[in-house]
Image: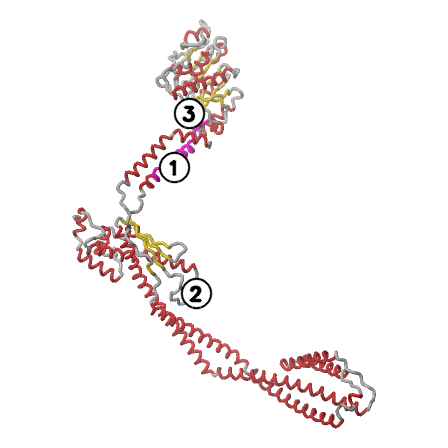
Amino acid sequence: MDLAYLFRVILKRKWIILGATLLASLVAWFLTRNEPKIYLSTSRFSTGFAVPDEIKVNESNYNIYDADVKFNNAINTWNSPSVISLLSYTLILHDLGSPTPFRSLTPAQKQSSFYASIDPAAARKVFEDKLENMSVLTSYKPDERDLLEYLALYGYSYKYLSQAIQVFQVQRTDYIEVDCKTENPELSAFIVNNLFDQFIRYYRNIRTAKSQESIDTLQSMMEKKKQEWEDKKKLLASEGLGDIASQNQSNLDLITEFERSLNDETDKQTDYDYELRRINQKLDNLTKGSGTAAALPNQNNNEELIQARKAMNDAYAEYLKTNDKAQLSKYKQLEAEYFSKYSNSNSVTAEEKGGGGDTKNDLLEKKNDLTVNIQAGKDKIRDLQSKIGALRSTVNSSSSKNANVESLLEEAKLSEREYFDAKQKYTNALDIGSSSVNNFRQLQVAQPAIEPEPSKRIIIVGMAGAITFMTAILLIVLLTYLDSSIRTPGIFARLVNLKLISMVNFMTLRNKSLQEVVMGKVEGEGHIDKRRSNVFRESIRKLRYEIEHSGKQIFLFTSTQKGQGKTTLIMAVSYSLCMSRKNILIIDTNFCNNDLTILMHAEPVLEKISEENKAMSLQEKIMAFSKGVPIETGGGKLLIIGSQGGDYTPSEILPRENLLSNLRTLLPEFDYIFLEGPPLNDFSDSKELVGYVDGVVAIFSASHIVKQIDKESVKFFKELNGKFTGSVLNMVDLENVNVI
């Protein structure tokens, strides 16, 4: 939709919009004239939710989401009916017993039958009991239902108090703020302070009950874990699995110790063998008495000997652990390699075996000592291997029992650990419960407000006006959007898509002569009416121009619906053509609605004119039966032939040699001949009349809504094969005449 068109529509209805806005503002101002003054009291409380002191049955991590849940729980508890009901009991007891109550009943309320049926002393006793026991009145009991209505009478019901109180968390802090707005500053402060007291009472009560439930649960869990631990110990003692387990562990420790001793003895045995071989080599050299110097051992061979010895010892230790024959073969191979390297590197010179070396007797003595040590080491090695084998046999024989022992031992240890954990939780719960920790603290005591809150009357009035203003605009835009009439040429082109030869604005002809409007002789018009008349006259002149330059002389004016303004347009364009010295003949062929005949006072003779009567020519008959319309200015003449009208078509009522079939014989006398046809949607007359004319002009009203039946008629216009001259958009708003 065109935004400029929408703006013009809104501007056209500006007084409706402004009037509705002003009316809404006045109504809001009137309704808020007795708005009471409101006093605000506020208080803040620290929660301590950053420190987790809650008794928990199960361990859980404390995080920000837990704190958020705690804040929500506390706020909901503050706003709960239980806490606010306790506050309402406090308020009603204050007003019933204080010489300066916050609220007093009006004389009309005190004279009511309901107030007379309430015993103030009995009601006060019930309120005191409810406040002491922290119980809530229920509407199921008739007496308590009357007390609830009694509270509502004073304005202390849950519904009113919940609307007056606001509880919320102060952003990015550990505080909760409570606000209260009432008509009495002292009442607002009293409500905030006493609401905190009642909240603490109720919170402590439910917290104590919850803590006791947690302590009882932890005690039950601790006793259960203790019984399970005792059962596991009894099972181990009855089966004797505890001794077997300790014995197996001791045997495994002995095996480890014996293997360590075996490795040490093996290393000593290897050293003894090396020393014995060296002594034997020396003895052989002394016996040979060779004076030649033996080759000096290569110093680099020491590293190789050390690595070979280490590899041999590692292979022997691996064999002792696994008792694998492959490891034994590997050990023997590494031993042979080591002795070979050792023999090659152990040659000495004759000088070393002479004067500064050992004597033969010394060497023999050392040899005997080494032989004794080697034999003793071998006996010890055999003894260690025997012990290790026996212990391994013992451990293997009890391997089937060992798995069960380990499983039961693990279960016993787990039960013991769970028991001590449960005991620790129970101890912590007792400590927390006995300390009665309460982290809620009132940081700011509520004080009566000195001045009332700023009045919102101006805001309410402004909002009422603004909402009404926007609503009116939206309704106008919505109605304009839903309006499917062809209001502008742009909409006409989109919906109808026919050639548009002229637009004629809406013109009120009340107390005016159409001929005077077309000729511009209307006097005493206002500015808007004069402008409308000028635009109408220029629109008719444009239509006259299109007719004159169409090359056609006989025209049929028709429409798709009735009430489109065909009669007015035919008369107006005829007056305009007469002003340009044209002779015009109008024939009223709209038998279903002969307005032309009535408005121009014509003789209804169309159905009677025929060529069968040869006494007069057709021109003579026209001049005899037609009526001339006087034209004040211009040199043209205007004649009209009327019709009687009726429920028939031209082919049914006109004679064989009728006037319409001989219209071309009248062209020497008349410049243009205009026929008016009935609407195409309702009648077929216009389709019959098309055969008598040169051109067809379709009239559409700007307030017309295009329907499916109109589309069929538009399709007929498009299929006229050159006879369709164009369409006229009639009754266009003056503001929309130039809208594309």
The label nearer to you, 2 versus 3, is 2
- Name the residue tied to disc 3: 733
**What kind of residue is marked 2?**
Ser
Q: Quadrant of residue 85?
A: bottom left
Q: Is residue 452 left or right of residue 486?
A: left
Q: Measure the C-alpha gap from mark 2 to mark 3.
A: 77 Å
Question: Which residue shows up at 50% across the image and 8% down it?
Answer: 668
**What kind of residue is marked 1?**
Met
Q: Main secondary structure of the magenta part?
A: helix
Q: Position of residue 542 (x, y in %)?
A: 48, 18
- Name the residue tied to disc 2: 60
Q: Measure the C-alpha gap from mark 1 to mark 2.
A: 55 Å
Looking at the image, which residue sits at the far top? 615
Question: Which residue shows up at 26% across the image and 48% down it?
Answer: 183
Query: Colour scheme of this structure image?
Result: secondary structure
Q: Is residue 469 magenta?
A: yes
Q: Position of residue 8 (x, y in %)?
A: 42, 29
- Name the residue tied to disc 1: 470
The magenta-colored residue range is 462-488
Q: Position of residue 625 (x, y in %)?
A: 41, 8
Q: Secondary structure beneath disc 1? A: helix
Sort mark 1 into few (<14), some (14-19) or many (20+) by Cα contacts within 10 Å.
few
* Comes first in the chain, label 3 or label 1: 1
Q: Quadrant of residue 446?
A: bottom left
